[in-house]
């Protein structure tokens, strides 16, 4: 490993050789000319610049675009601190803190001409922002992170579809270390790195739909190899370069699975007060910039260390939701499973039923507005089937598992108005009732399948008694471990059930047949545990099974007939124009091929969103046009 720093006006080797074979090479020092005496508040290479352009900000000289010799190409006067950038089409998006306005500013820069567009500002925050950094996700949405006093942090959506938004959208708040000053994001692994000066560096998931958790990258002695402090950092695929400012050292770390391993600690000899850090990878090695705050000189060097990139998960197509429902009335883990009821005469009057597993049943229209709330208890899963004779009328049925009573809560749906009414309660012998789905046989009988967390399934035949629905148990079988999601293929009299950590199985849905399990798809490369919600998209020519792969926040589509070939997988991401966040941690889903009009002419997919963002609220459900799924997966 070889490392050399130089500074103006003379070359100065700052690091001792790490091996006898190491050789230093001359590097042309930058000349900072007119602004060299001004204390830079942050440094950055211009991403994608073929001319080795740099960015710098200071409280005195504002924001500067520099060539590699340090000559000013263009300048925005003002007082700025903090700096990060990402390419955005043929522009560069630049984020910094406008100290005069006390607001975070986002500029668009044309690197070819050096021209700057007027900035977009974040609303003034109720905390002091110490640092900013940018992140581009798999769908090319660009987000901005702020780190601030007393552990406050936020994530904002600032660009989508290669365009800066007219106004930023707050995605979520983040509990960060107290007194954090610096952050960086490695886009490939979607990790946000934040410093805690006297403790160490932390890595957080950066994706907008990720849960909030952190893991240590490096800790200050005696808990790690850091001598004195964790300050600025810079990232590359598989690695992080961190600055121990108080010890005047650079520290190299390699990611290995979920852990980080120190590679080397490099003393910055001759640098008195290192403060800011930037890097970029070149054919010659890792080019590094360090600012010495004691004399405002910029040190530059090349490091011949290469991190081994971390294997990345496959990039899946991202589909945008068109509609989201009003949130459920309960906070926390509440929304669970949806079911689509199709109006038999007027598709636009169709409904989406969704369980609130702390209160009851929610009923939404196709615009996502709540039209009913039925507080009947802790309902977990719900399903619907049409045409049931009840008290001399033909109604449609909805059935849900009620965890308050370990029972089946039954509802009638008026086929004209869509009004949902309680229609009975069916006791079960299950001690911890959980998932549910319905099956309608060729004879017209409607059956329910309910499961218990211990793997037991009970099948009931539903029948009318007066104005109530009752049930009789007709079959019982069991899987080895915890199930939940299931869906019945009425056409082929087949039940698909999910054993959460193991597989999706197919079993004969008829009550007089043996419950022999056939493997459909096992947890592994394509489906990540937990296996959760399932739905069927069926037409005269198509028959697809859809599965919520909760472990990697994706949705897998496969043929619903043997040999159950996988057609693909996708994620549900942010719709910036509509102000709708993506979906993640999905418990339940449902899908229909019915023409519901408008964007739903080829059908609709509904998924539960376990993490409601933009803004952060109670959970809800997202609606996705099936046409977008078919396009993304190249389905007929």
Image: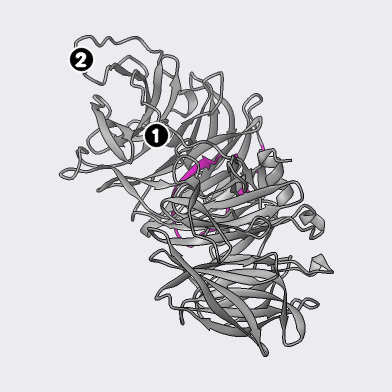
Whether residue 123 is visible here, answered yes or no, is: no
Residue hosting label 1: 234
Please, is residue 274 above or below residue 216 in the view? Answer: above
Element type at mark 1? strand
View extreme (bottom): residue: 466
Residue 599, by quadrant, is: bottom right
Disc 1 crowd, CA 10 A, few/some/many (<14, 14-19, 20+): many
| Quarter in which the C terminus is drawn | top right
Please, is residue 248 above or below residue 632 in the view? Answer: above
View extreme (right): residue: 345
Q: Which mark is residue 19?
A: 2
Q: How many marks can you see?
A: 2
Going from N to C along the chain, the mark reached first, 2 or 1, is 2
Element type at mark 2? loop
> Horizontally, is 520 left or right of 430 in the view?
right
Q: Position of residue 299 (x, y in %)?
A: 36, 24
Closest to the observer, 457 or 340 = 457
Q: Position of residue 262 (x, y in %)?
A: 25, 32
For image coordinates 39% across by 76% down, the residue present is: 431
For image coordinates 75% across by 66% down, the residue present is: 342
Q: Position of residue 47 (x, y in %)?
A: 54, 28
The region drawn magenta spans 117-140
- Residue 274 is a magenta residue: no
């Amino acid at each position: 490993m070889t490392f050399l720093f130089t500074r103006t006006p003379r070359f100065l080797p700052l690091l001792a050789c790490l091996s006898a074979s190491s050789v230093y090479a001359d590097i042309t020092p930058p000349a900072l000319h007119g602004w060299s005496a001004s204390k830079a508040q942050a440094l950055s290479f211009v991403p994608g610049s073929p001319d080795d352009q740099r960015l710098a900000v200071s409280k005195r000289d504002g924001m500067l675009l520099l060539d590699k010799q340090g000559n000013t190409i263009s300048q925005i006067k003002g007082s700025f601190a903090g700096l990060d950038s990402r390419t955005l089409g043929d522009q560069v998006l630049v984020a910094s803190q406008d100290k005069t306005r006390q607001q975070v500013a986002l500029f668009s820069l044309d690197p070819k001409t050096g021209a700057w567009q007027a900035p977009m500002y974040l609303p003034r925050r109720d905390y002091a922002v110490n640092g900013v950094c940018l992140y581009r996700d798999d769908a090319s949405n660009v987000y901005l992170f702020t780190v601030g006093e007393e552990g406050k942090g936020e994530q904002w959506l600032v660009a989508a579809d290669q365009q800066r938004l007219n106004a930023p959208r707050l995605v979520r708040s983040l509990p960060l270390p107290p007194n954090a000053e610096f952050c960086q994001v490695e886009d490939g692994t979607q990790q946000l790195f934040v410093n805690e000066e006297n403790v160490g560096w932390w890595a957080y998931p950066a994706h907008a739909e990720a849960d909030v958790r952190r893991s240590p990258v490096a800790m200050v002695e005696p808990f790690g190899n850091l001598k004195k402090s964790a300050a600025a950092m810079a990232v590359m695929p598989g690695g992080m370069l961190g600055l121990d400012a108080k010890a005047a050292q650079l520290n190299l770390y390699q990611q290995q699975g979920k852990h980080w391993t120190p590679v080397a600690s490099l003393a910055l000899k001759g640098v008195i007060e290192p403060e800011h850090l930037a890097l970029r990878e070149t054919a010659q090695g890792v080019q590094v910039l360090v600012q010495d705050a004691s004399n405002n000189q910029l040190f530059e060097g090349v490091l011949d260390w290469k991190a081994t990139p971390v294997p990345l998960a496959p990039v899946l197509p991202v589909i945008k939701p068109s509609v989201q429902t009003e949130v459920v009335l309960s906070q926390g883990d509440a929304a669970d499973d949806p079911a689509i009821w199709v109006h038999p005469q007027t598709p636009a009057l169709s409904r989406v039923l969704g369980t609130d597993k702390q209160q009851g049943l929610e009923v939404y229209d196709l615009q996502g507005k709540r039209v009913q709330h039925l507080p009947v208890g802790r309902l977990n899963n719900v399903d619907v089937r049409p045409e049931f004779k009840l008290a001399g009328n033909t109604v449609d049925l909805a059935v849900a598992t009620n965890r308050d009573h370990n029972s089946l809560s039954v509802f009638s749906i008026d086929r004209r108005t869509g009004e949902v009414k309680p229609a009975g309660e069916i006791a079960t012998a299950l001690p911890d009732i959980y998932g549910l789905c319905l099956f309608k046989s060729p004879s017209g009988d409607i059956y329910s399948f309910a499961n218990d967390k211990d793997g037991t399934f009970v099948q009931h035949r539903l029948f009318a008694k007066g104005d109530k629905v009752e049930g009789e148990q007709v079959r019982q079988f069991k899987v080895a471990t915890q199930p939940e999601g299931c869906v019945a293929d009425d056409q082929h009299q087949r039940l698909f059930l999910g054993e959460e950590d193991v597989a999706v199985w197919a079993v004969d849905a008829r009550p007089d047949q043996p419950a022999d399990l056939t493997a459909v798809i096992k947890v592994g490369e394509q489906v990540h545990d937990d296996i959760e919600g399932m739905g069927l998209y069926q037409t005269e020519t198509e028959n697809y099974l859809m599965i919520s792969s909760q472990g990697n926040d994706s949705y897998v589509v496969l043929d619903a007939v043997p040999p159950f070939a996988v057609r693909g997988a996708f994620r549900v991401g942010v719709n910036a124009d509509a102000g709708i966040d993506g979906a993640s941690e999905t418990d339940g889903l449902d899908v229909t091929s019915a023409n519901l009009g408008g964007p739903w002419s080829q059908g609709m997919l509904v998924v539960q969103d376990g993490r409601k963002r933009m803004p952060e609220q109670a959970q809800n459900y997202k609606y996705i046009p099936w046409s977008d799924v078919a396009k993304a997966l190249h389905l007929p």
